[in-house]
Amino acid sequence: MRQLAAIAVFAVAAAVLPLFITSGVVLNTAIMILYTALLGLAWNILAGFGGQFSFGHAVFFGTGAYAAAVLQAKLGWNAWATLPAALLLGAAVGAFIGALSFRYGLRGSYFALVTLAFAEVFRILANNVTFTGAGVGIMVKLKSGAENFQFATKTGYLYVILVFVVAGLVLCWWLKNSRYGAWLQAVRDNEESAAALGVNVFRVKLGAIALSGALMAAGGVFYAQYFQYIDPGLAYGPGVSIEALLGPIVGGLGTLWGPVLGAVLLQLLGEGTRGLFANAPGVSLMLYGALLVLMVTFMPSGVLGVLRRRA
Amino acid sequence: MMLEARNLSVRFGGLAAVDDVSLAVPRGKIVALIGPNGAGKTTVFNLVSGFIRPDHGRVELEGRDITRISPHEACRLGMARTFQIVQPFGAQTVRENIAVGAHLHHGSRADALRAAEAVGERVGLAAHLDKLAANLTIAGRKRLELARALATQPKILLLDEVLAGLNPREIDEVLPVVRGIRDGGITVLMVEHVLRAVMNLSDEAWVLSNGRLIAHGTPREVTADPAVIEAYLGHGTAARMKAAYA
């Protein structure tokens, strides 16, 4: 209950932000923080709660992004109508990958490699079939208006991504306070013990990857609407997969607020380094890499984990 | 019968780990499965609880064939087990650990946590409920294994060496807990190395050696059986002991 109240406070605080800030740059940073938090929340469901580390979450993100773009551009769907379709497709791709890899007991780095491979396969496919626009990518047509999921100001996008993030937080709160969540965390900590206590390990893992895939697909839909352009590299490239896993690892794996905290820290770090090394693009990526190594070596439980131990 | 195994066999490569084992566990009793190291006791547990599929034979729970079901289904039908090498959910508290078992019959988190607390008290973990499972002593973890399995409200409980690694005082503390479980109506099948505990607790014992059953009877009967003594102490020992004590 205290956590739900914290989520409400967070939602209200983010919602009143545009009342005080009109700077497009600051609002854009806020949107990117929330967007990164959403990807992190999605990844954290499978990895943090379920113990299945994916290196290829772009496969769900790209599926969501392409669902939104293709259904609008080729089939004339309304942008909002693509959202449930994208969520379902994300969940379905998750269930498919999960069914294949969990059925054969893939764990640890083997599972990570399989997800990475799937993301790459999807990227290559998107690069080569015409209805995704192949290598040229695909544009989301400019159709202003909230009813078309396109907003004249950043504020509209901020509210949409905030709703997504709050939904993700509530979902993770539920995982912390429900039977399914207890089973999922038991599977993470010890599959054999969980099975001996009546937990259907396969089905629990399948549910986690489907939920994670659906939430990640929501991130893809948002990306497509916000930037109005996607191509195979943007949608299915490894960059997205890394963006998804970095936040929770920095913030705190398997915690409610870790992905949000991680997103704040990473975006601020990103802004800072982009300013510092404006004429050396790529330095911020190297910093990200170094940070990841340092975090995993010295703070495997993330910033929240360290704070909690101090408390 | 609560549990019956008929002609169970499994081979690992060229090794007949369990060879034509038939045993029965009557309802409401504590039955021990004993034998020297490597006799196949844990393998029998794994066969019965669905962690390993047998090559031959049949397992019945209350007359129902459960030979090829998976471990979680066995648990749902009322058979819970513990592991010889304790496997706690280390990142979670003792209460949360036990609640995982309790969730089998409690859908709501609050109910499961309440049930977990009651079970924790029953096995003597009341003072440790909010500790992380990883921070428990070996004795504490053994109790936690027991508590988690109990929380699934089983009809039969398979205990794989719950006393191994405990000192004599800790063993004396656990014995009444196991007896209490039986008196609460749960059938117990236990693999045990601590013979004093077997003598003390069990109503019946089966003896396994090199994958085969070699004796069955009351604990007193089987420990006096020459075949059992030889299995533990080597060929010819029974005769030498008889001569020495005669």
Image (cartoon, coloured by chain):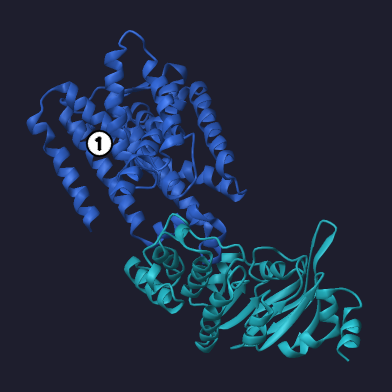
Residue count near mark 1 (Cα–Cα under 10 Å), binned few <14, some 14–19, many ≥20 = many
User: Left or right: B160 with respect to A279?
Assistant: right
Residue at left 16%, top 47%? A9
Measuring from the top left, give residue B178's x and y in whole percent: 55, 81
| Between A176 and B220, the one nearer to me in the picture | B220
According to the picture, the residue beneath numbered tag 1 turns out to be A161
Q: Colour of chain A?
A: blue
Would you say residue A82 is visible in this rendering?
Answer: no
On the rendered image, what quadrant is the N terminus of chain A found in? Answer: bottom left
Residue at left 18%, top 49%? A8
Label 1 amino acid?
A: Ile
Residue at left 41%, top 34%? A295
Would you say residue B93 is visible in this rendering?
Answer: yes
- Chain drawn cyan in the picture: B
| Between A289 and B69, the one nearer to me in the picture | A289
| Between A302 and B77, the one nearer to me in the picture | A302
Measuring from the top left, give residue B116's x and y in whole percent: 40, 71
